[in-house]
Amino acid sequence: MRDFDALGDAITAGLLGRALEPNAGELADEGHTHEKNCLNCGTLLRGPFCSQCGQRSHVHRSVRGFMQDFLQGMLNFEGKFWHTLPMLAWHPGQMTRRYIAGERARFISPVALYLFTVFAMFAALNFTGTLGSDGAKTFQDQIRTEIADNQAAIVKLQAKRQTAIAAGKDVADIDRKIGRRRGDITEGQNVLSGKASPSDEIGDDTPSFIRPFIKNAKDNPQLVSMRVQDAASKYSWLLIPLSVPFMWLLFPFRRKYNTYDHMVFVTYSLSFMMMLVVAGNLLIELGLTSIAGMLFFVPPFHMYRQLRGAYELGRFSAIMRTIALVTFAFAAAGMFMAAAVAIGMS
Ligand SMILES: [Zn+2]
């Protein structure tokens, strides 16, 4: 390998027409380096960074240096994060436009933010028990809710039956409905008491190709919800290429904005929406359900503001495009979740 490195250095030096320092690439033992050539690519150094590859002229080989790098990396991300987040929330259009125009170092890149929020979202969902750990409990609760619903329906049907009898009408249809509800209640109670396996519940009208999925989900809800979650996080990046063609449709005659611009727009937008999910979950966990419910109305406003600012649109054309984008987003989110569930259940 050393030979290859030396060859690479020689080629680089040759291409640049500069002499190669004899000990370029060697690290000093004291843990601090004083190099004339870049340790990464061999280019002759001028100033604190390599003009060719951007690496620092001085690199450290000490624990102290490692800690410094660690701290600097964290502070750098955190500084950018606290600069990016408020902009993304309040001035998403301006931020998208500025990032596209070239202010890259100031903000967290769309891809980094996206990866970070995917991670944060699934961490939050797991933490609050929306996915995963409480799957089995949720299933039992579901059956209990179903039983209660059926009992309420029977009370209503019986009242209806009384009126029908008083009016001298035929009650055969109502009786049949009551019978079906009672059957459902018995089935649910059997599942709860362990007399029947949940999979027994799959009705005759369930299409045969769905049955194995449902059986799988009911037999092992925890595993399935974990796999749904796994599929959703693994394929979440697909939302970006899925959304970009739609952005082309939104701006068919605008040569000024290219695919890269749309990708930045979509990725920042999706990151924000995932952050809303995280915020909503935390609010629900804190018992602030009504405030969490209000977050549901945030996406259209955010899309409007981001569209208007990023593409420098007037009010009317921004509103029209927001309506189209909201419609598309709900359809895409629905399809994505359906796909994740199908993958998780199979
Ligand atoms: Zn270099």
Image (cartoon, rainbow, N blue to C red):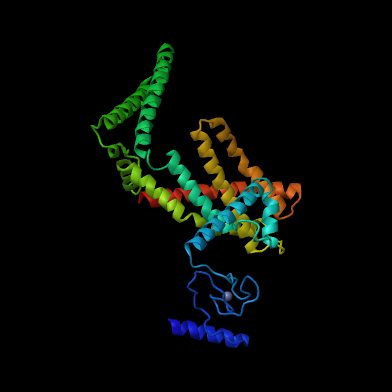
Q: In which quarter of the image is the N terminus?
A: bottom left
- The vertical placement of 188 against 14, above or below, is above
The residue lying toward the viewer, choosing from 145 and 279, is: 279
Rendering coords of residue 163 (x, y %): 43, 14
The residue lying toward the viewer, choosing from 104 and 96, is: 104
Q: Can residue 228 be seen in this view?
A: yes
Q: Which residue is drawn at 59% across and 48% down?
A: 272
Q: Which residue lies furthest to the front in this view?
A: 30
- The vertical placement of 58 against 96, above or below, is below
Q: Residue furthest right?
A: 314
Ligand 1 image-quadrant field:
bottom right
Rendering coords of residue 218 (x, y %): 32, 41
Q: Is residue 26 left or right of residue 138?
A: right
Q: Is residue 84 left or right of residue 151?
A: right
Residue 108 lies in quadrant: bottom right
The residue lying toward the viewer, choosing from 278 and 154, is: 278
Q: Residue at x 49, y 78 (%)?
A: 26
Rendering coords of residue 330 (x, y %): 56, 46
The residue lying toward the viewer, choosing from 151 and 124, is: 124
